């Protein structure tokens, strides 16, 4: 089974928020969705789930039209965060409702997890701490046993120990039930250890899909340059992540042989390739914006 | 698949909404039963002295309260973002709309009328026909008012605007309609002279048909509603100007109908002032024009 997002476009108050969004989610995949604040991640989730009506495009579950075939809607679980109806009810009442909403709702597992994490069954969710609420959201999402789950910033507000447990829970559930999970997050470090691939939402569209293994042309280096001035070609071909004196950490968005030759030249006394992370790829993708922003800051200073 | 979307989807919508609203339904029912007890007790204890009027009005009072509670409950759904989630469920927007009509409007009218009939049968069987007739007339009028409310709730976005629009509709265009107890009042001609029952029945049938048409339009609009328009005064773009024109025309007609003095150009012009102000206010909320005041050259 594949969830197909095809040419989805959406305007909100005459402003294009999504433009020709295309991607597929396959069975048993964990996919990350990253983008800058206001890039349209929540709008995209809302459109896939059916909260918002797209202006154009198709969402399909295999060959079926997902948007217009409401009977298919229990195949996907999504609750808008942070303001949603769940917080006004207790886990007990939510179970009662979701048992009707999702035909495969796993009551036993739900009860087990509520007890395991010591979440008060009779207390309304709004009285939970932020971390407990986030944890409850994960439990309720997977208890639905919907084959597709959309999670918006699921690790936000969780302490390190709970975060690890939640990540483990996501992985276990995906393995056990072949669930497909689409996770929107700002926390790229967390996504690195969790997802199979990442979708980058930029300029109202999916700018690129990447997995760390699949991005051989993006490279990260730490280097020490000779002389007082940073070699000019570095600014033009990469994104400088950090600079302390003559030591520079840089990500090259499109590493070509010519850059390698220059790095091996006399301008540098030390060059070392570093392992690349999703965060580096994200930075590299927004290199132009970051460069302009840095220049603006420098001018202001 | 199509069969599930139809009948199965409607059953699912009713099951889901009933489960969510179970506590409110129980409370509303308890309130109705309490009113029934008060009605019966007053009838038995103070027969023909006090509360007589109340017992005759039991059905309409109960369904009036229940429909009001239902309207508040729908606003609460929006406040709690329950609507947003229900749009993602395996029920269509139209099925959700119809479910609310059935559970929050039709069921209260039918159940309270039934309670009224049973109570009358137990206490004053002779009044049975009068009570049925009165419940039917009031039921149709409430059904009509509810249809307008459902239309307003669907079309208008923010909660406070829904309430304001509902009050406007109750005060301005609806109140004259609910005065039409006989068909002569509607058409201004004698259609069924000397036959009051036929006149009342015809008027009720016309109001009922009007309500059903308004519900159908409301149901159609509900399928076009997207969550992103929740902050828009008018959620369907094409209806923004018609809404402003409607505010002006309905207000103007109401004022003209209420004018007792002979109509002249002064009256015609004077009666345009308030509707014009109302239309301008509506325009401001619908189109949110921004005026930039600047002294810069």
Image (spheres, rainbow, N blue to C red):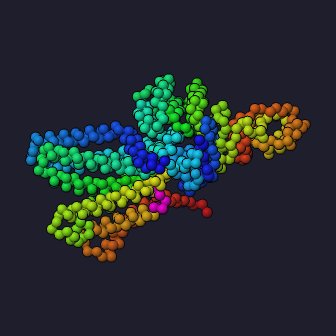
Residue at point 26% right, 53% down? Answer: B139
Q: Is residue B239 magenta?
A: yes
Classify B283 as above or below B86: below
Main structural element of the magenta stretch: helix, strand or loop?
A: helix
* Residue A89 placement (x, y as % from top left): 42, 35
Residue at point 46% right, 54% down? Answer: B223
Between B41 and B264, the one lying in front of the other is: B41
Which quadrant: the C terminus of chain A?
top right
Residue at point 87% right, 35% down? Answer: A268
For this orientation, the residue located farthest to the right is A266
Residue at point 39% right, 64% down? Answer: B246
Give the side of residue A184 with respect to residue B72, left or right. Answer: right
Give the side of residue A67 with respect to residue B123, left or right. Answer: right
* Residue A51 placement (x, y as % from top left): 50, 47
- Span colored in magenta: B235-240
* Residue A287 placement (x, y as % from top left): 73, 44
Classify A196 as above or below A67: above
Q: Is residue A252 visible?
A: no
Image-quadrant location for residue B209: bottom left
Between B149 and A227, the one lying in front of the other is: B149
């Amino acid at each position: 089974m594949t969830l197909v997002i095809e040419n989805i476009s959406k305007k909100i108050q005459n402003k294009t928020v999504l433009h020709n969004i295309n991607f597929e989610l396959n069975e048993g995949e964990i996919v990350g969705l990253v983008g800058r604040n206001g890039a349209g991640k929540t709008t995209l989730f809302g459109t896939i789930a059916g909260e918002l009506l797209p202006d154009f495009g198709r969402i399909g579950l295999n060959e079926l039209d997902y948007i217009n075939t409401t009977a298919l809607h229990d195949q996907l679980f999504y609750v808008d965060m942070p303001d949603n109806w769940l917080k006004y009810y207790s886990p007990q009442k939510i179970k009662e409702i979701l048992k009707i909403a999702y035909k495969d709702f796993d009551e036993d597992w739900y009860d087990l997890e509520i007890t395991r994490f010591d979440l008060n069954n009779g207390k309304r969710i709004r009285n939970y701490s932020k971390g407990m609420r986030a944890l409850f959201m994960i439990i309720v999402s997977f208890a639905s046993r919907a084959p597709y789950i959309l999670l918006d910033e699921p690790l936000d507000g969780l302490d390190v120990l709970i975060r690890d447990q939640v990540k483990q829970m996501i992985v276990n559930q995906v393995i056990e039930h072949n669930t497909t999970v689409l996770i929107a997050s700002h926390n790229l470090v967390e996504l690195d250890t969790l997802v199979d691939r990442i979708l980058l939402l930029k300029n109202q569209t999916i700018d690129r899909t990447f997995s760390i293994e699949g991005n051989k042309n993006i490279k990260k280096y730490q280097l020490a340059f000779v002389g007082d001035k940073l070699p000019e070609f570095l600014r033009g071909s990469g994104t400088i992540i950090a600079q302390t004196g003559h030591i520079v950490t840089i990500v090259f968005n499109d590493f070509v042989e010519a850059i390698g030759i220059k790095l091996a030249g006399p301008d540098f006394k030390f060059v070392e390739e570093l392992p690349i992370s999703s965060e580096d790829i994200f930075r590299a993708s927004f290199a132009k914006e970051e460069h302009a922003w840095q220049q603006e800051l420098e001018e202001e200073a | 698949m199509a069969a599930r979307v139809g009948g199965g989807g409607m059953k699912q919508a009713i099951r889901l909404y009933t489960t969510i609203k179970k506590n409110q339904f129980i409370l509303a029912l308890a309130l109705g039963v309490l009113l029934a007890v008060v009605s019966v007790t007053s009838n038995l204890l103070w027969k023909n002295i006090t509360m007589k009027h109340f017992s005759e009005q039991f059905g309409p009072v109960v369904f009036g309260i229940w429909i009001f509670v239902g309207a508040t409950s729908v606003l609460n759904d929006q406040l709690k973002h329950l609507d947003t989630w229900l749009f993602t469920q395996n029920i269509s927007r139209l099925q959700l709309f119809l479910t609310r009509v059935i559970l929050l409007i039709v069921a209260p009218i039918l159940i309270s009328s039934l309670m009224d009939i049973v109570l009358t049968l137990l206490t004053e069987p002779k009044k049975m026909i009068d009570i049925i007739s009165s419940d039917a007339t009031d039921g149709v009028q409430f059904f009509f008012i509810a249809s307008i409310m459902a239309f307003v709730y669907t079309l208008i976005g923010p909660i406070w605007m829904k309430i304001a629009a509902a009050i406007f509709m109750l005060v301005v265009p609806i109140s004259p309609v609910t005065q039409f107890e006989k068909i002569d009042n509607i058409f201004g001609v004698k259609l069924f002279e000397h036959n009051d029952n036929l006149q009342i029945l015809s008027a009720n049938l016309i109001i009922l048909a009007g309500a059903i048409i308004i519900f159908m339009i409301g149901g159609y609009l509900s399928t076009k509603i997207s969550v992103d328009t929740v902050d828009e005064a008018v959620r369907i773009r094409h209806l923004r100007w018609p809404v402003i024109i409607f505010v002006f025309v309905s207000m103007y007609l109401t004022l003209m109908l209420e004018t007792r003095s002979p109509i002249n150009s002064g009256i015609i012009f004077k009666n345009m002032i308030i509707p014009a102000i109302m239309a301008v206010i509506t325009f401001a909320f619908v189109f949110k024009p921004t005026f930039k005041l600047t002294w810069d050259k």
